[in-house]
Image: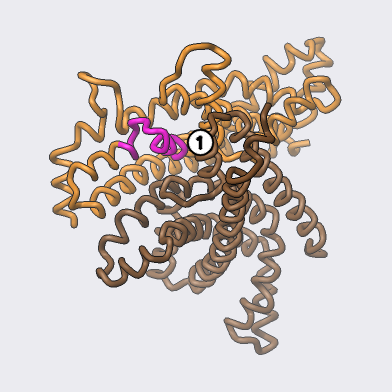
Amino acid sequence: MEFSAVLTGTYLEWFITGAKISLVLFLSASVLAFIIALLLVAVRSTGFRPAVWLVQAFVEYHRNVPLLVHMLFWYFAVVQILPMAVQIWINQRSAEFYFAMLALALNYSAYMSEDIRSGLRSLHKGQIEAARALGLNYIQTMRDVILPQAVRIALPPLVGQSLNLFKATSIAMAIGVADMAYSARWVDNATYLTFEAFAVATVFYLVVSSLIIALGSIASKRWRLQT
Amino acid sequence: MIAQIVEIIDVYWLLILVGQFPEGPLGGLALTLCMALAGLIGAIPLALVAGVIRTCPGTIAYYPISAFVHAIRGTPVLLLIFWAYFAVPLLFGGSISGVATVVIALIVYEVAFLAEVLRAGIEALPKGQIEAARTLGLSYRQAMQDVILPQALFNVIPSIISQFINLVKNTSLGYIISVHELTYTAYQVNSQLLTGTLPVFTLLAIIYFCICFSLSQAVSWAERKVERLRIAPQQANGGLR
């Protein structure tokens, strides 16, 4: 074991940068995914047929195509149909990070919207009726009465999805995002200390995963609906 | 766009379907499905053992198996693939092909997930089942083998199919270590064409969608079937407990 060799100087810097990028990617993509998921749920619950179909198609598309394909699609394909000026602008700003974030957020928003929707379905119909009877309009009912409860019910599966999202950030290395998995591979290539390099990355992913699970179960207990 | 996709299918359909086969190694869609199937079939026996052990807290094997399940669930599949690439030659000697690397990583990953699926299936059965079997004089092993597992396995068929969908999606990671499965094949087609990035990746997404969507329809069908054949009659006979 030569952990001291991979945890010094440039290699340590690579790992720290990788860890930072993984965490920033995870946090930004999960916040974005959650917001998109709420929008999807809101659109779907209007009951307007074409909108419902669009949301369903969106959800099925993201659930049935691998995340890697989404990332490659955004990174290689979508970029090319943008106007030249936009392409240049994007390429100057480490585009792969933003495309990875977008792919992750869209993909997991599909899963999260399904979780929130099943939380929604477990709410009593009287909630909406009571809110409407009190004079709240549709948006106020959703924002102040229904969604806060639905999200609290859906918290455990949502935590599960954010854990999946965190693990999936590692796939971003396929389009060149210098995340933790990418750093591990680079340190391995540079030092041939394969075991040590992968062990550092694995411990990182395990620690953050455990933190997500622990914080999630505390939050789920803290904000459980009293019924 | 549609014309371009049709043209790609027209020229590259064989490459996308089976890769270089039969002149070269199997690739493309066929390899994707074979790797996913191998991952599932390889994982089932180990997952059965791990799943049964996970229902018995307090036994010696419970703690290492639980630690394994939690560790795998917190690790990205991609890292498991890296580990397999490094560890398997050390354990068994010799070098290892990319396909074997992905399959071994998928088996390890899937053992942890299927074990939890099976544990849930066993724990969802009425307690009376194991009690009745033991009362009839069956040993724990016989009761598991002849009474509990056949029922639990049938009830979790939908979840096993969902796991297969996950496996199909996870084989795409073979692309990162240059395994010539579907995603990598699409990437190759893309570099040969140079012009049609959007049609190629659209076609790739469509192919995955068709496979995984039909499988997820199979999941809903199997769920209804299990519900009708097993859950509903049990409830009619006085509840699940």
Q: Residues within 10 Å of mark 1 (few under 14, many from 20)?
A: few
Task: Tell me where residue A88 appears, x and y as whole percent.
Answer: 31, 67
Secondary structure state at the residue bearing disc 1 = helix
Q: Is residue B102 left or right of residue A216?
A: left
Q: Which chain is orange?
A: B
**Residue that extends furthest to the front in the rendered view of this protein:** A9
Q: Is residue A74 above or below residue B135?
A: below
Q: Quadrant of the N terminus of chain B?
A: bottom left
**Residue that extends furthest to the right in the rendered view of this protein:** B58
Task: Tell me where residue A196 appears, x and y as whole percent.
Answer: 63, 32
The chain carrying label 1 is: A
Q: Does residue B233 appear anywhere in the picture?
A: no
* The magenta stretch spans residue B154: no
Task: Tell me where residue A130 appears, x and y as whole percent.
Answer: 70, 80
* The magenta stretch spans residue B173: yes
Q: Which region of the structure is painted magenta? A: B168-184
Q: Does residue B13 appear anywhere in the picture?
A: yes
Which residue is at the front of the view, A192 or B103? A192
Q: Amino acid at mark 1?
A: Ala
**Residue that extends furthest to the bottom in the rendered view of this protein:** A135
In the figure, the shade used to draw chain A is brown
Q: Is residue A218 above or below residue A184?
A: below
Taking the spot 52% from the left edge, 32% from the top edge, the residue there is B82
Residue that badge 1 annotates: A190
Q: Is residue B176 left or right of residue A170?
A: left
Where on the picture, by quarter, is residue B27? top left
User: Magenta span: helix, strand or loop, mainly?
Assistant: helix
Task: Tell me where residue A226 appears, x and y as whole percent.
Answer: 82, 64
Taking the spot 68% from the left edge, 32% from the top edge, the residue there is B69
Where on the picture, by quarter, is residue B46? top right
